[in-house]
Amino acid sequence: MPSWAQALLRVSRNKWVQAAFGIVASGSLAYLAAHNIVWKEVADAFIAFPPELALLALVPLAAAIALRASRWHVLLHRDGVSFLQVLLTQNTGLGFNNLSPVRMVSEPVQLAMINRRYGVPFPRAFATLVGENVLDIFTTALMMALGVLLSPGVRATNANIQLIGAFIMFVVSALILTAVVRGAVPWQDRFAFLQRIVEGFRNLKDEPARLWLSLGANIAHWLLLGVAGWLLALGLDMDVHPVTMATILVAATFFTSAVPSVPSGAGTYHFAVVTMLTESGADAAAALNFALMMHLLIVLPPTAIALFMTGRMSLGTLRNPGGAPERVSDA
């Protein structure tokens, strides 16, 4: 590789450069989402919003959060970890990701916490976490394909490109998992640690019912999130079908994860939601209000859990996954 290319690669991996690029990207997208907005209309729509609908939206939202945790918990049924512990672990990782200027800490935090705090063997924890993420990628591709078929707003915002990206991610992940499970990874027989990870993947392969349960919980999670969004949309006089809303939220989440942004994806997430809703015929002020409300509902619960768990964990819990477990019970 040429020296200039190596230097460019080092710069691109610098966390401060990534954070700065995220600020620029989020700021630019936030401007694009709001530059034609009449803020008085936004304020009027917010004041007129029925608070009982916001409270009602918390019910499917809470169910969606529980289902998001259950999709991992069903894969950990052999390891003596409770549903509450998985719920806390998953949301702590998501919460740290919301707070981090470089949004790539969710899985490492979850892996370290489930291993060090709750004693799940690292190879098993790693295999189930990767398996859950592959199923999530598959669900994302499935829901976005459904959105392209059902929603003109999704079609009009280049979600086809996002759909292709999600599909490629799924295919690559599936090929890697297949290679690992079939023993096609070079040198795996020379390393006991890698052999244990391969065994963890093989255990998942031998539990197809658990994999289907995890996939079903994943799909139900997004559909319930769509119901919560639909309730908020009703309060803003937007007529968006719950399934269409679910696909818009899936596409917005995928877009936010694919584009560098500030902590919690502010600006980036709002741009994606506002663009798709307005292309679907929604009023711009109502769409921005919806994006702000939905973003808060999605971001606040895991962030609050992460802050709560920070006071209950030592810093060592989140370092050196695979070390001696602490075996702390939060149940």
Image: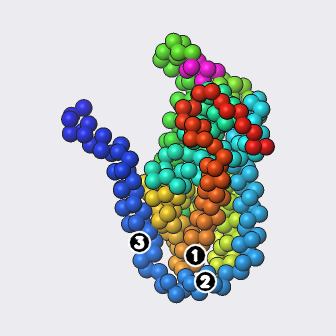
Element type at marker 3?
helix
Residue type of the residue flagged with mark 1: Asn
Q: Residue sitting at 56 percent across and 50 percent down?
A: 96
Q: What label does residue 289 carry, if any?
A: 1
Q: Is most of the magenta stretch helix, strand or loop?
A: helix
Span shown in magenta:
193-199
Q: What label does residue 45 carry, if any?
A: 2
Query: Horizontal placement of 236 versus 35: left or right?
Result: right
> Real-space Cα distance between discs 1 and 3?
15 Å
Answer with mark 1 or mark 3, whichever residue precedes in sequence. 3
Residue type of the residue flagged with mark 3: Tyr
**Residue that numbered label 3 is attached to:** 31
Query: x, y (%) of residue 88?
Result: 69, 47
Q: What label does residue 159 carry, if any?
A: none
Element type at marker 1?
helix
Q: Is residue 193 visible?
A: yes
Query: x, y (%) of residue 38?
Result: 48, 84
Nearest to the observer: residue 84 or residue 224? 84
Label 3 environment density (alpha carbons within 10 Å; few <14, some 14–19, many ≥20): some
Q: Are marks 2 and 1 in contact (CB under 8 Å)?
A: yes
Name the image quarter holding the N terminus: top left
Q: As drawn, which residue projects farthest toward the left?
A: 3
Label 2 environment density (alpha carbons within 10 Å; few <14, some 14–19, many ≥20): some
